[in-house]
Image (cartoon, rainbow, N blue to C red):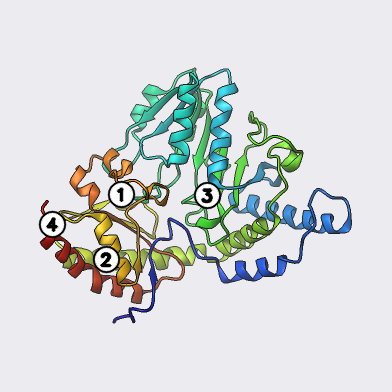
Amino acid sequence: MSKNQTQRVYLDNNATTPLHPEVKKVMREALELYGNPSSLHTEGREVRAIIENVRAETAAFLGAKSEEIIFTGSGTEANNTILSMVATMPRKEIITCAIEHPAILEPAEHLKKQGCKVTILPVDKYGKVDLDALKKAISTETALVTIMYANNEIGTIQDIKTIAAIAHEHGALFHTDAIQAVGKVPINVVDEEIDFLTLSGHKLYGPKGIGALYIKQGVPFDAFMLGGHQELHRRAGTENSLAIIGLGKAIAMRALEMDAEHDKLLALKTALKQGIEKSIPEITFNGHPTDCLAGTLNVSFARAEGESVLLYLDLAGIAVSTGSACASGSLDPSHVLLATGLAVEYAHGSMRFSLGRENSMADVEYLLEKLPPIIKRIRDMSTL
């Protein structure tokens, strides 16, 4: 089955997702709501009530309390908010891992320059954090352990509850960047003993420019954004009410659609993986074979530069990624893949196919039609 080449196949949902139709609908309707939610008049109170309803929905989706949720301008801001607190804590050590997103690694490096100790844990060949290394590294000086829930490039899901328990045994707080996981796998912050959790609207079919941060009631917290009373004095700045409304509807739709979508995406990924295995030699699949996001498939092609594959696929109407969108300006091989021990030449030839709610088996079949001849063409031209 072939698609008309004027059509587009979007397989880069880990970078960003298209707006859910229901999100578009409520955001269009909300364009008429202009009141400042801090104002006491009717217009302000109307918007405030909507924001608080979204806060309650977001909390319920995570198993949290409404007052434990604050809205931020992005997932990156939420991550920076949590890491920045270490600079003012009695303990001055952060423990994280080698495959974190730059929104964790770069703030950690900044804190290191300010005198904080930063320990980067290794991962195994599948991208799982080395728990023995964590047990050896953690100490009474550790303020925060921050480990992502699911990796954005290879999809590997970490043993969050176990990691959180280790952190708490030593009196440290635990944060997880769950931007790639929220809305894709069930998460309960109480059951998993999470102190802080980050999510982002545009990864779950909501708008860009909106994130949220779960802050467990009773844990230490210092505001990152100052200059206003908003979000119970935890994040200054007038709330982005339109984006918050979109996030709320996106989360509501995740609650309805997540389970069925998981099964659908897993079936599509399985078909794609099997098709690539049958039609293209000299490949390596990256990430954990089972503890992995249902819609994420990362594969490395020997003797084929990832950037070339991406451009040829784009010409064929297929959008994919060579890794993290936030690092797409770099020609360096993926730090995630190198951390798993993958050879540099294979890391350079890696592609990430991330499926979403709008994808179908026809999309997979079209990719499997176009990808093998593209890989062959690039390899025939290659000097590697």
Three-letter code for the amino acid on which mark 3 is drawn: Ile
Mark 1 or mark 4, which has the lower sequence index? 1
Q: Quadrant of residue 23?
A: bottom right
Asked if one can make out residue 195 in the rendered structure from this viewpoint, the answer is no
Other residues around mark 1 within 10 Å, as few (<14) / some (14–19) / many (≥20): many
Dot 2, crowdedness within 10 Å: few (<14), some or many (≥20)?
Answer: some
* Image-based side of 224 in relation to 361, left or right: right
Q: Is residue 324 above or below residue 335?
A: below
Give the residue at mark 3.
187
Q: Secondary structure beneath disc 2?
A: helix
Which label was assigned to residue 370?
A: none
84 w.r.t. 213: above or below:
above
Marker disc for residue 382: 4
Are dots 4 and 2 in contact, CB under 8 Å? no
How far is mark 4 from mark 2, CA to CA? 14 Å
Residue that mark 2 sits on? 312
**Residue at numbered disc 1:** 287
Q: Position of residue 264 (x, y in %)?
A: 41, 68
- Residue 88 coordinates in the image, percent (x, y): 60, 22
Q: Residue shown at 46%/37% (left/top)?
A: 104
Point out the tag, 1 or 3, that comes first from the N-terminus.
3
